[in-house]
Image (tube, coloured by chain):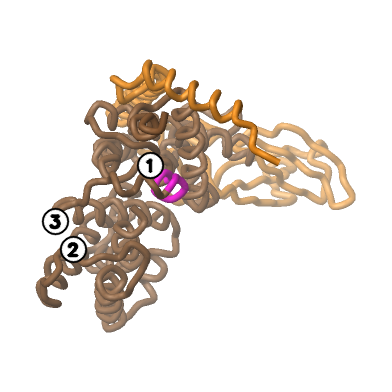
Chain colours: A brown, B orange
Amino acid sequence: MAPSEIIVRHAPTPREFWIGLGRAFAGALIFAVPVLMTMEAWALGFHLHPLRLALFLAVTLPMLVLLHKYGGFRQTVALRDRIADAFVAILVAAVAATAVFFIFGIVTAEMPLREVIGKIAVQVVPGSFGASLARAQLGPSSLEEDIPEPGYTGELFLMVVGALFLSANIAPTEEVVLIAYKMQPWQEIALVVVTLALMHAFVYEFEFRGSHSPEPGAGFLSIFFRYAIVGYVLVMLVNLYILWTFGRTDGAGFSETLSAVVVLSFPGALGAAVARLIL
Amino acid sequence: MTKNPAKGDKQQKQQSDDKGKTRKSGTSLTEWVVAGISSVALLAVLSYLVIDGLSARNGTARIVVLPLAVAATEGGYVVEFAAANRAGKSVAAVEIKGELRNGDEVVEESSATLDYVPQESQRKGALIFRRDPEAYDLRLFASGYSEP
């Protein structure tokens, strides 16, 4: 009877699916609750350009499929299983957001369809990432040994996911633009330096849980340039995309946009640095 | 006290039964059903947003303010109104003004601000007057908005 334990882990029974679904709901709620309770995010639902919102949703799907290679709410190996998981994560996020919004009274039955769809669609992105991260966070740790170690591209991808996830939580708020207004150029430079230092330190210098050296024996400069610098540039690109999606770059000049990107890259970079640790 | 061995056996038996059924596929039928529903819903939402995005969006908001009810309270006469935005464009910080007129003369003015009026939607609010609006000519209109 003993060998059956090993096989069961790879063959999801309906019961395991329901447990995974429950975890996904928990993850969607825990990780999306800051956005669910942000006023600006509700307003984005109806004044966001519909094509940008559609693109944002469409981009989420392949990101989730890739993410499930390293995390996700159950053990998945084959591509088609990961696609199924990604769709489940999106549905879970949409159902969770709809339920919470109805209870909060943010979405009501009398509202026009466009407003309801917009409000929920904005929540689907952080929610579905939350649902996917749930297994890594809430699932049994015994499964972690089966997750493939990401290579260099994989590491960068996880950074992008981490940045996308944390930035999408913060980008809807007015505070990003307000902080950008308040900062002097030298303060912005300081923020870039601090962000880079934190990004490097969080992952490769401090001994966090699961912390690891991606390439044992590689020197400080090699790691710093190939992970922190490249990672930071990717984080900035992700944030530029998010700010554009949320209409924050419309009519803004170059320096104003850059300031907002630098400000949003602070949480984004923290997300990127920590993504590798929580996955 | 010893553990009840029967319970453990039953669980193990069930596990091995399930294993036999689902071992070959990595995804259970239930999950495929859920994933199928999700993909249809996502496709519908995406198509809806794309169609909405490609359809001509009116550049100016058309805001129509209609009075709903008047109630006499200790704090004055409360005139509830509904501001409807008939255009495909959302507006923010909508200033709603109300005037009580006696012929050409404006007897009393009042105003309120609505945070948002989304496209093709209506939002409700109220204006408060000291004089009875029933005795005068009540006019409600939007006097301005900002783009969100």
Would you name the residue on which mark 3 appears?
A: A152
Residue A178 screen position, x and y as percent = 41, 68
Side of A266 relative to B143 (left or right) = left
Q: Chief secondary structure of the magenta span?
A: helix
Magenta stretch: includes residue A136: yes
In the rendered image, the residue lying farthest to the front is B1
Task: Give the vertical position of A89 relative to A13 (above or below).
Answer: below
Looking at the rendered structure, which numbered label has been put on residue A221?
none
Callout 2 amino acid: Pro
Q: Which residues are magenta?
A: A134-140
Circle number at residue A214:
2
The residue drawn where x is 14% and y is 56% is A152
Label located before the other in sequence (3 or 1): 1
> Where residue A124 sits: x, y (%)?
41, 38
The picture quadrant where one finds residue A252 is bottom left
Marks 3/2: CA distance?
8 Å
Q: Which residue is mark 1?
A: A132
Of marks 2 and 1, the one in the foreground: 2
